[in-house]
Amino acid sequence: MIIATTPTLEGYKITEYRGVGTAQAIMGANIGRDFLAGLTDIFGGRSGQYEGKIEEASNTALEELKVKAKAKGANAIVGIDFDFGTVGSSESMMLCVVSGTFVMVEKQ
């Protein structure tokens, strides 16, 4: 499966559009992660704990999008876009939504 954030693929011709798809992943944060992130907020620096969860959510959503594209008979996804946010009453869950256009491509 070829994936790209661009609307076209260099060296390939889009021969058919198979639809637009979305996939999402929601990852819960835990008390320990919140505590460590709080220390990072106080002392500065990067929060590896949250970065890891964001990467996990991104990868999970992207893999789900690939499965949906294959089910539609596509061999590529173009125009991929990632959106992130938080959900839940305490906003302690991280959300990743990925969308893209399912297409059939062939080499030019």
Image (cartoon, rainbow, N blue to C red):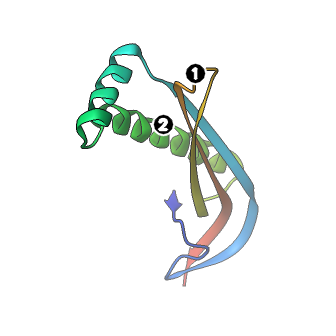
Nearest to N terminus: mark 2 or mark 1: 2
Q: Is residue 83 above or below residue 7?
A: above
Decide which of 44, 87 is in the foreground and name it. 44
Along the horizontal axis of the image, is 38 left or right of 59? left
Residue at 55% x, 72% y: name it.
6
Residue at 40% x, 41% y: name it.
55
Is residue 83 at all visible to an observer of this figure? yes
Residue 75 position, x and y percent, is: 59, 59
Q: Which label number is shown at residue 90?
A: 1
Residue at 67% x, 59% y: name it.
102
- The crowding category of the residue bearing disc 2, from other C-alpha atoms within 10 Å (few below 14, some 14 to 19, many at least 20), is many
Decide which of 106, 67 is in the foreground and name it. 67
Residue 65 position, x and y percent, is: 60, 46
Res 52 → quadrant: top left
Q: Secondary structure at mark 1?
A: loop
- The crowding category of the residue bearing disc 1, from other C-alpha atoms within 10 Å (few below 14, some 14 to 19, many at least 20), is few
Along the horizontal axis of the image, is 62 left or right of 56? right
**What residue type is disc 1 on?**
Ser
